[in-house]
Image: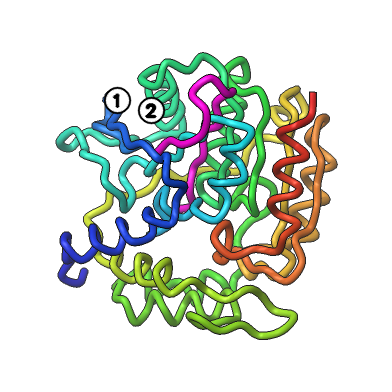
Amino acid sequence: MTGYDRDAFRVAYDKVMAKWPGDRETRTVPTPFGETRVHACGPRDAPPLLLLPGGGGATSASWYAQAAALSRLRRVHAVDLIGAPGLNAPAGDRHPRTVADLADWLDAVLDGLGITTADVGGHSYGGWIALHHALRNPGRVRRLFLLDPTQCFAGFQAAYLLHALPMLLRPTPRRVRAFLAWETGVRAGSAKPGVGEALDPDWLHLQEAAAGFPATRPVTGPRPAPDALRALRVPVLLLVAANSRTHDPTMVANRARATLPCVETAVLPGVSHHALPQAAPPELTRHLIDFLSGS
């Protein structure tokens, strides 16, 4: 593990958070696994929307490009994942070790915010957590949207794991940047026509600053059982990144349609897995607004 610079991470984190709407408020919510940082914006009397980022250095800050549009419909609550890079304060050596622990953590966050039921959205690993929570506690989830979720409907591509391995074994800013450049097909501040949007340099710097973060080992496990997915009656929107190198986008969409009874699916053209949700085509916002506006 490389030396981790806490101050540099905080500066990078705050710089991305500054891109959020001006009415943003920050809360710290106690849970059995430690304190969770939550950023909120939007009308206080609007229906709540809980947002979960991807793993790694994503953090709640990564929702900045969608926060303004979503907060016109919802009271947005974006959380840092427990045990992952962010501004959470862990409870000693107690951290989630099972899927049930993650569901309990998310329930505690909702309870701490005074929320009984909410719309929930998640990207990547955050989508995996959100889906498992909905399967265990469907009464707390009104609507669920998943942005290119990992390990929900298909496994990782071998090439993706191979490219990620150096970064996972010894995370450094250089390795993080190289991996993201490979997966997204673009570099900071530039874009290849037809491949994807430019990577925000501030967002990319936050990913680099998270290298070596003293995070706990993430909870992993098998994909949700098909029978459990077939029993889920919560409306689900699945948005798949057309250029994702994480998994086979077509397989993800097909398996979701085959198992989820209340699912809408759409492909986001010209964007990769790790470019979400900060860099995405206009279709992303339109799909989210249309879905959340449904009865």
- In this view, the residue in front, 277 or 108, is 277
- Reply above or below: 265 against 163: above
Residue located beneath label 2 in the image = 105
- Residue at image position (15%, 36%) is 92
Is residue 10 toward the left or the right of residue 191 in the image?
left
Q: Callout 1, which amino acid?
A: Thr
Residue 211 x/y as whole percent: 29, 67
Does 133 lie within the magenta span? no
- Reply above or below: 97 against 243: above
Does 54 lie within the magenta span? yes
- In this view, the residue in front, 255 or 12, is 12
- Residue at image position (60%, 35%) is 131
- Residue at image position (61%, 29%) is 119
Label 2 and label 1: CA atoms lie apart by: 6 Å
- In this view, the residue in front, 281 or 110, is 281
Is residue 192 toward the left or the right of residue 20 in the image?
right
Residue located beneath label 1 in the image = 31
Q: Which residues are magenta?
A: 39-56
The quarter of the image holding the N terminus is bottom left
Q: Residues within 10 Å of mark 2 (few under 14, many from 20)?
A: many
Answer with the quarter of the image where residue 133 lies: top right
Q: Is mark 2 in CB contact (under 8 Å) with mark 1?
A: yes
Is residue 192 toward the left or the right of residue 37 in the image?
right
- Residue at image position (15%, 70%) is 3
Residue 10 x/y as whole percent: 23, 58
Answer with the quarter of the image where residue 259 lies: top right
- Reply above or below: 110 against 210: above
Residue 72 x/y as whole percent: 61, 37
Q: Callout 2, which amino acid?
A: Trp
What mark, if any, has residue 152 been given in the picture?
A: none
Per the image, label 1 sits on a secondary structure element best described as strand
Residue ranking furthest to the front: 22
